[in-house]
Amino acid sequence: MKGKITIALAGNPNSGKTTLFNALTGSNQFVGNWPGVTVEKKEGKIRGRDYITVQDLPGIYSLSPYTAEEVITRNYLVHESPDLIINIVDGSNLERNLYLTTQLLELNIPVVVALNFMDAVNKNGDKINIKALAQKLHCPVVGISALKKEGLEELIRLSVETAKKNTQQALFSFEQKIEQALSYIQNIKIPNIPKEKSRWYSIKLLEKDEKIMEELSLSGDKKEMLWNIIKDIEKTYDDEAESIITDERYTHIAKILEGSYKRANRQETVSDKIDKVLTNRWLALPIFAGIMTLMYYIAIYGLGTIVTDWTNETLFGEYIIANTVEVMTNAGAAPWLVSLVSDGILAGVAAPLGFVPQMALVFLFLALLQGSGYMARVAFIMDRLFRRFGLSGKSFLSFFVSSGCGVPGIMATRTIENRRDRDMTMITTTAIPCSAKLPVIAMISAFTMGGAWWVAPLVYFTSIAVAIMASVIMKKTKLFSGEPAPFVMELPEYRLPNLQGVLRETWIKISAYIKRAGTIIFAMCVLMWFLGSFGFQDGQFGMVESSDSFLAIIGGAISFIFIPLGFGNWQAVAATFAGFTAKEAIGTTMNILAGLGEVDGFVEGGRLFYLSFFPTNMVAMSFLMFNLFNTPCLAAVSVLYREISSKKLFWFAILLQNLGAYAISLVIYQLIGLALGEVGFSIMTVVAAAVLLLILYMLFRKERTPQARPALYGGVN
Ligand code: GDP
Ligand code: MG
C-alpha cells in the first residue's frame, strides 16, 4: 500500500477551491458564486485513491488573518502541517492571487500551484507561460479548469510526486536589509517556534502579527529586542514593517509575471454591462426589492399556493387524514390512538410537509441567485447602504444566508473582521425569516388584510428593516460602537448557474427540511398533542376537553404577559412556546390545537386557528412578528452560544431578542391597531407610544463614533 497523504486546498475566496474539492472527491459541497461560502474546513478522499485525503479550507487573501475563517485556515496550515498544499490560483486574476502564494511558499510545506480558470483565461486571450511561471515560483504549476474537470489527473499525479519528494522549497529573498532583520529575529532564539517554520514566524514577527505574538507569549526582554529590530527597519524604510513586506511581495510578483504573463486587452465584458444596470446607484435597491418580491410572490401566492393548497387540503385533509381515521376506527383502534395519529401526528406534520412545494421554490430561487453571482452584487449594494449606518456589507451576507437557515447565517458571520460587528450580526441575523418561519408567514398572511398578496413580501421587508434597525441601535451603544472594517470583495463574473448544482443544492435543503418534519417536528407533535389532550378531571388523569388540558393550564398561566400584544389566549401562547424548539412547530401547534376534537373530518388548521384566536388583523400580525423576532429555534440558539464572544453576551442576546420582539408587537398591535380602529385607546396605547419614541430616539440619536469611512469598492462605483 502507498503511504497516506494529506493535501490542503488553499486559495483566495472564490478561486474555485470547493469546485475542485468536489471534482476530486466526488463530494457535494455547495459551490456559491460568492466568497464566504466555505467557512469551515471540509475533508474528503480522492475518488479511486483512498490514501489521499483532501481538505477544503476557507478562502484567504493572505496569511495575516483578519477574520475568524482566515484564522481557521492559517492555524490548520501552520499547526497541522499537511503533506502538501495545493494552492489554487485564479488564473484570470493572477497578480492578486500570487500574493498568497508567496506566503504559502514560506511555510516549508511542499506546494503545487493549480492554475485554475484556464478555460476563462484562454477565452479572454490572456497568455500564461506555465513553464516559466513554475520556474520562477520554484514549484510545480498545473493549468486546470475545476469547472470543466480538465487537468485534474495531471494535478493529482504531480501532487503525489511532490509530496513524496518533500524537498525544501526554494524561497525568494527579500531585500538585503530585510533579510538581515529576519536573521536578527531568528537570533533572538524565541522558544516554541518549530525549527522548520522559523522563517515564516520571523516574518510574521517582523510584521507585528498580534496573534503570533500572543501565541508565542514573548518574555519582556525578548519582546524588547524584537521591537528594536522592527523600529530600526521601519526607520530605514520610513514605513510600517507590514507594508514594507507587502511591497516587497508585490515587487517580487511583478518580477515573476514579467515574461510569463501577458494580459489581453479587455473589452467591456457582458458582466460589466449587466453590472451597469444591476449595481446602478439608483436602480440597484429597487431591482433587488423587485426580485425578492417576485420570489415571495411566486413562491407564496403564485405557483406555490396551487400545489400547497392541494397537498394541505386534498392530499392530507380529505385523503390521508380522513381515510386514516376511517380505517383505524373500523379496525377498532382506541379513540386516543386515533386522536394521536390524526389530531397529533398527521395534522401537525401536515403543516410543514404541506409547504414543501413552496419551500422548494424558495430554495431554488435562492440557489439561482447565488449561483449566478448576483448575490455578491447585492452585498455591494447593501454595503453602500449599510455603511451609512456604520455597518458592513458582510452583515448583509449573513442576513442573506439566514433567509435559508439561521444556523449557517450565524456561521457566516465568521467572515466579519471586527469582533463587535460579528457579535452584533449574530444577534440580529436571525430576525431574517428563515425557511422554517416561511410556512408560518404563509399561513398567517393568507388571512391577514383579506389575504392580500403584498402581506408576505411586506413581512419579509419588515424583517430586513428590523434586523438593520436593531443593528443601528446596537451600533450606537458603547458596547458595539466602532468603525466597520473596509469591505473588500472580489466580484465574480456573472455565470449561468449550473443547473445540476442548483438542483442538488435545492434538494439538500428540502430533504433536510423534510427530515426535520419527520424528527423534531414529529416529536413536538406528540408532545403538543399529549399536553393538549390530557389533563385532570375530577382528580382523574385522562383525556379531557382541550380547555382543561395541561397545555391550557400552563399556557393560561403565562398568557397574561401577552394580553398587551393582543394574543393573550393559551393556544397562541402554546404555539409561541413550541416555536422555541423549531419555528415550524408554530404552524404545527396551530394545526393540532385547531383540530383537537375534530377527529371526524380534518379541518384546515391554519384558517380555523386564525378565525378562533386572531380576532383582528393586528392580533395576527403582532403574533407573527413576536414569533419572527424572538429567540430563534434551539439549533440556532446553540450555535449562537458557541460562536458568540462571551456567555454574558449570549444571555444579553437572548434578552434583547425577546424584549425587542415584544416591543415591536406591542407597537404594531396597539398603535397600528388603533389607527385601523381595531383596538381602543387605553393606558397600553400610551405605553406603546412611549416604547416607539424610545426606539426612534435610540435609532436617530447622534452617533458615538465618527462618520464611517467610505467602503473600498473593488472596482464598483
Ligand atoms: P471557492 O470560494 O474557492 O470555494 O470557489 P467555488 O468553488 O465556490 O467557485 C467559485 C465560482 O467559480 C463558481 O461559480 C464556480 O462555478 C466557478 N469556477 C470554479 N472553477 C472554475 C473554472 O475552472 N472555470 C470557470 N469558468 N469557472 C470556475
Ligand atoms: Mg468554497
Image: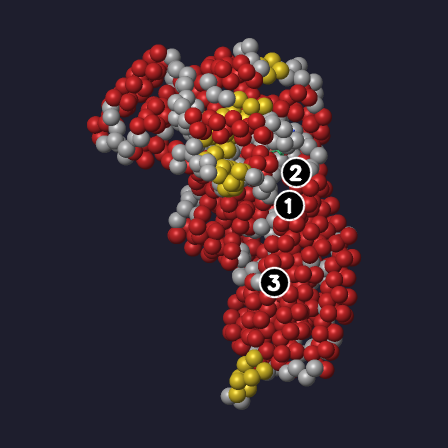
Amino acid type shown at disc 2: Gly
| Local secondary structure at mark 1 | helix
Task: Categorize mark 1 by other alpha carbons within 10 Å: few (<14), some (14-19), many (20+).
Answer: many
Give x and y (percent) for residue 234: 34, 17
Q: Residue furthest left?
A: 221
Please, what is the three-letter code of the amino acid marked with disc 1? Glu
Alpha-carbon span between mark 3 and mark 1: 20 Å
Q: Amino acid at mark 3?
A: Gly
In percent of the image, x 54 and y 65: which residue is there?
A: 577
Q: Ligand 1 lies in which image quarter?
A: top right
| Residue occupied by mark 1 | 505
Question: x, y percentage for residue 305?
Answer: 76, 56
Bin the neighbour count of mark 2 within 10 Å (Cα to Cα): few under 14, some 14-19, many 20 and up: many
Looking at the rendered image, the quarter that the C terminus falls into is top right
Measured in 3D between alpha carbons, the distance from the residue under mark 1 to the one under mark 2, in whole angstroms, is: 10 Å
- Mark 3 sits near ligand 2, with its Cβ under 8 Å away: no
Find out if the beta carbon at label 1 lies less than 8 Å from the nearest ligand 1 atom: no
Which mark is nearer the camera, 1 or 2? 1
Residue visible at 48% across and 15% down in the picture: 136
The reply to whether the C-beta atoms of the residues labelled 1 and 2 are less than 8 Å apart is yes
Ranked by sequence position, the earlier of labels 1 and 2 is: 2
Residue for badge 3: 518
Residue 61 visible in the displayed image: no
Task: State the CA–CA distance, disc 3 to disc 2.
Answer: 30 Å
Determine the image quadrant of residue 195: top left
What residue sits right under mark 2 in the picture?
371
Q: Are marks 3 and 2 in contact (CB under 8 Å)?
A: no
